[in-house]
Image (cartoon, rainbow, N blue to C red):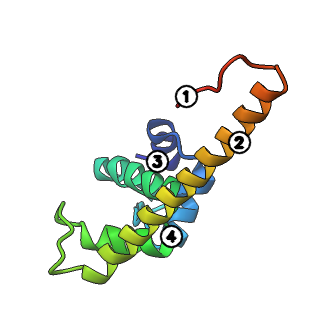
Amino acid sequence: MKIGQLSERTGASPRSLRYYEQQGLLQPARMSNGYRDYDEVSVAVVSTIQAFLNAGLSTEVVREVLSCTKDDAATTATCPELLARVMAVRDGLEEHAARITAQRERLDGFLVAAGLEDTPRTA
């Protein structure tokens, strides 16, 4: 499939797909006219790329994740350093979420004290 078709199927812009290729995350075949030719596997790969980028991983780490999961399983035996990096990103996200929750609770308290809300909102 061409880049526009992959874009429609994944929601990733053609520009993003070209960027993923530039970063070594996606490797489409090339047709004789030079156009990119994506296969069905590319749809799943793009979804994986988007999920990891949205989770806060860098393209460098995503590239490593993709190379470690080519056989559908990241194992501590084959990718221990990578798994440690992913766990560190996950832990950082948990800390960030806790900070955001605390900030929201302070704002809720302010709104309650100001009489703008009856009770603080709960998550």
Q: Which mark is residue 59?
A: 4
Cα distance in 3D space between marks 1 and 3: 46 Å
Q: Where is residue 44 shown, x and y percent of the image?
A: 33, 49
Q: Nearer the viewer, residue 51 or 110?
A: 110
The type of residue carrying mark 2 is Arg
Residue nearer the viewer, 100 or 102 = 102
Q: Secondary structure at mark 4?
A: helix
Disc 2 + disc 1, Cβ < 8 Å:
no
Disc 1 marks a residue whose amino acid type is Thr
The residue closer to the viewer here, 123 or 44, is 123
Looking at the rendered structure, which numbered label has been put on residue 122? 1
- x%, y% of residue 7? 51, 43
Q: CA distance from mark 3 to mark 4?
A: 23 Å
Q: Earlier in the sequence, mark 1 or mark 4?
A: 4
Which residue is the site of mark 3?
2
Q: Residues within 10 Å of mark 4 (few under 14, many from 20)?
A: some
Q: Which residue is mark 2?
A: 106
| Residue 109 visible somewhere in the drawing | yes
Left of 53 or right of it: where is 66?
left
Q: Amino acid at mark 4?
A: Thr
- Closer mark to the observer between disc 2 and disc 3: 2
Say which label, 1 or 3, has the lower sequence index: 3
